[in-house]
Each structure stands twice: as structure tokens, then as C-alpha cells.
Image (spheres, rainbow, N blue to C red):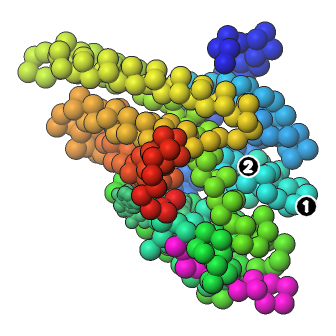
Amino acid sequence: MDLNRTPEEERFCNQVRTWLIANQDDLKGDRTYDQAENMDGWMAFLKRWQRKLYDAGWSGISWPKEYGGRGATIIEELIFTEEMARAKAPNLMNISIGIELVGPAIIHHGTGSQKMRYLPKILSAEEIWSQGFSEPDAGSDLASLRTVAVEKDDQFIVTGQKVWTSWAEYSDYCILLARTDPKAPKHKGISCFLVDMRSPGITIRPTVQITGEAEFSEVFFDAVCLPRESLLGGINEGWKVAMTILAHERGTSAIKYQIRFRTELEDLISLSKSMTRDGQVLSEDPLLRQKLAQCYIEVEVLKYNIYRSVSQIMQSGKPGPESSIIKLFWSEMDRRQKEIGMELLGIYSQLVQNSKWKVDGGQWPRAFLWSRAGTIYAGSSEIQRNIIAERVLGLPKSNDAK
Ligand SMILES: Cc1cc2nc3c(=O)[nH]c(=O)nc-3n(C[C@H](O)[C@H](O)[C@H](O)COP(=O)(O)OP(=O)(O)OC[C@H]3O[C@@H](n4cnc5c(N)ncnc54)[C@H](O)[C@@H]3O)c2cc1C
């Protein structure tokens, strides 16, 4: 991969920077919402922000123009993501599920009319998406899922339960996995559906997490009728769609994290220079300096692994099992980085966002608690190690977990 930018890429980068500077008032918008206290306000703000980006042509940078994208290259997408993170701009509301997961799945497996129907509204945030994969007894071993979709006339009747469904409460559509052939081997009897979340028979029960937010929910399906056109990728072909989604969730979506980790490290370094303990400035503490230096090395290692993955996608068109290396590395690194934040804060690390004495807006305790999630969603660290052992190193299979 050539790491030098072409003149067109430099021009593109300047265009992004100019637009972000011109719209910097909006960038501060996310600081005004305490996510745990005002989730509705935060969601409405993110929707407006994405619409603004869409209207300016900044949503779906590498998506085809016919579906509302910019038709630019993956490198330009990478540049845009880096510039957004560098400006500390809020993420697009639909990014983590709609744009990064559902969009590629529809582009790869959808019919022409499904592409025209769903893709532009994902980019404009007119329709927010959630992902209904995990169930109470099917997380790592996703293929054991028990939600069923029974074919009847020209419909599928769905009954079952999903869990940990991020943004379910705010979503208009859900990409759902359900069993359509109970007699087939478990990976082969699953289909994928595009489900209108306002369909009769769907109940959503939010779950409050350790950060105080209720980002995800349990979702119950009680004889929910889905039209035939909601099937994505053919009957009993759902596992292939799921694999497309998981590869994107583990690989390409990490791009946006790298610069975020870098800017967070810079914040940690500033914090270490401004705080004292027992009369000593923390940046002079030899052990903390070692940890911050190690953190810098890891952020750089992540960057080059992401570039390697981008280069592979440019050659093959899709992420491979190597994306597990990136997922495992960034999520474990995130935990180490946020532990340093807690160590720097000392007793202040107990003060969360609504505390009068909080440091840095209370962001570090929240980030520390949140960092544990990364080593679980999109396949836990143990599952990523299994994938690396089996599919990258060619070691014998241990079981059939996802
Ligand atoms: C913040 C967050 C958001 C999420 N959002 C969504 C979402 O939007 N949609 C969705 O469908 N799901 C979502 N999930 C669910 C997530 O995908 C699952 O939590 C994850 O796959 C693990 O499944 P589980 O929770 O059932 O744990 P289990 O599979 O029960 O695992 C429990 C423990 O056993 C270990 N383990 C399991 N199998 C093996 C094995 N074969 N070898 C070694 N160790 C093993 C795991 O690593 C883990 O430590 C989300 C999770 C989190 C934390």
C-alpha cells in the first residue's frame, strides 16, 4: 500500500477540513447532551447532524452514487473518517449499524429494489437501523439461535426473542436472523430479514447498562408478519449475510476508532501535565510515562494494521478473517488506555458526568466503563482468538462458535 496521498486525495482532505471548520458550531453539539440523562435529545441531535452531512454529500463516502453515496474511494472514506475524528465531530447516528453493517449487507446480497428502497434512507438518517442477531442462548454461538420465521402464503411469521439489540428503541428497521429450516444443520437453516420495527407484535424492553444509558434492549417478536420482500439474500442463506456483516463489524468499522484513540491519548497526555499528586506533576511519574509511551506505540500499531486491512479490501473487495486481529487489538487496547485515564484521575475517577467536581466533563470514568463493551460485542476476545487460531493460522477447529 502506498501511504503517500495523491494530489486528488490532498484536495479531498482540504475540502473535508474546510467544511468541518465552517460547521464547527455543530461539532460542539454533542457536548451539550448528557447521554444518560437525555438520550432522546442526544438521538435527535445525531439525526440532525447526519442529515446535515448527507445534504452536503458526506454520508456514504465510498457508496455508489445511485444509492445516495459520494462514489469516492475507500482511501477517501478513510481520510474523511480520520478528519471527522480529528475534529472530534460526533459520529453519524446510523454509522455503526446502518452504514457500516446493514448497508454493505444490502449492497452484497440485496435485490435491485431492496437497494433502491433502503440504502438512500440509511445515509440520510431518515431510517435508523438495529441488528437483531444475539439471543439469550445464542451470543458467541450465534448459529444456535431459536427465533423462528415460518413461511405462510406470501409471508413469514416471526416468533422469538432477541437481546442486547443496540438502538432498538430508536430504530425504524432491524436486520434480523431467524431460523427458517429447523431440520437443517444449524448454520444452514437460518434466513435474514429486513424488519419494520413498527410491525404489530414487536415489544421493546430497554436495558440500562453500567454507564447509566439504556443503549440496548430486549426485543420480543410475537407472531410478527413479514412480507416476502423483507427476505435478504434468499431462503436459508442468512448465514452468508451474517458473515458479511460480522466481517465489516470487526474490520472496516475500526477505522474510525484509530484517530479517536490518538486524540484521546493526546488528552491523557495533557491531563498528566495538568494534574499533581503528592506535590509531583503526574507527567513526571516514571511508571505513568512508561504506560503513556506504550499506549502511543499501540495506537501506531493499530493504525498500520488498519491500513493493511484497507489495502486487502481494495484488492479483494471485502474484509477477511484477519479483521479479527484488528477487533481484538483495538478493544483490548481501549481497555488499557482507559485504565490509564482512571489511574491519572486517582480519587477523581469516581466522579461521573453529573458530579460537580468531575474532571474533563466526566468523560474518563464513562469511557472506562464503556471500554469493557468493546471486548464483548461483535464477538468477544475469546471468539476472536479462536477465529485467528483456526482461520488465520489454520489450527484445528475447537467448536462451531461464530
Ligand atoms: C455494548 C454491546 C452492544 C451489543 N449490541 C448488539 C446488537 O446490536 N445486536 C446483537 O445482536 N447483539 C449485540 N450485542 C451482543 C453481543 O454480540 C454478544 O454479547 C456477544 O456475541 C457475546 O455473547 P453473549 O453475551 O451471549 O456471551 P456468551 O456467548 O454466553 O459468552 C460468555 C463468555 O464465554 C466466552 N465464550 C463463549 N464461547 C466460547 C468459546 N467457544 N471459546 C472460548 N470462550 C467462549 C465468551 O468469550 C464470554 O467471555 C451487544 C453486546 C454489547 C456488550
- Residue 333 location, quadrant: top left
Q: Is residue 34 above or below residue 58?
A: below
- Give the image quadrant in which the ligand numbered 1 is located: bottom left
Q: Is any atom of residue 89 visible in this view?
A: no
Name the side, left or right, on which 76 lies relative to 265.
Answer: right
Report if residue 129 lies within the magenta region.
no
Vertical placement of residue 291 versus 242, above or below: above
Q: Residue at x 53, y 27 (%)?
A: 305
Q: Earlier in the sequence, mark 2 or mark 1?
A: 2
* Residue type, numbered disc 1: Ser
Residue at disc 1, CB closer than 8 Å to ligand 1: no
Image coords of residue 344 (percent x, y): 23, 28
Mark 2 secondary-structure assignment: helix
Start-end of magenta stretch: 144-157
Q: Nearer the viewer, residue 161 or 392?
A: 392
| Residue 261: numbered disc | none
Q: Which residue is mark 2?
A: 104
| Residue 312 coordinates in the image, percent (x, y) | 66, 31
- Percent x, y of residue 221: 60, 82
Compute the Cα span from label 2 to label 1. 15 Å
* Residue 257 appears in the picture as rendered: yes
Q: Where is residue 361? Give x, y as percent.
A: 37, 36
Q: Residue at x 64, y 59 (%)?
A: 242
Q: Residue at x 36, y 48 (%)?
A: 372
Look at mark 1 in the image and give the residue it sits on.
113
In the image, residue 177 above or below residue 396: below
The front one of 291 and 385 is 385
Image position of 99 (left or right of 305): right
Labels in figure, total: 2
Residue 147: say if magenta.
yes
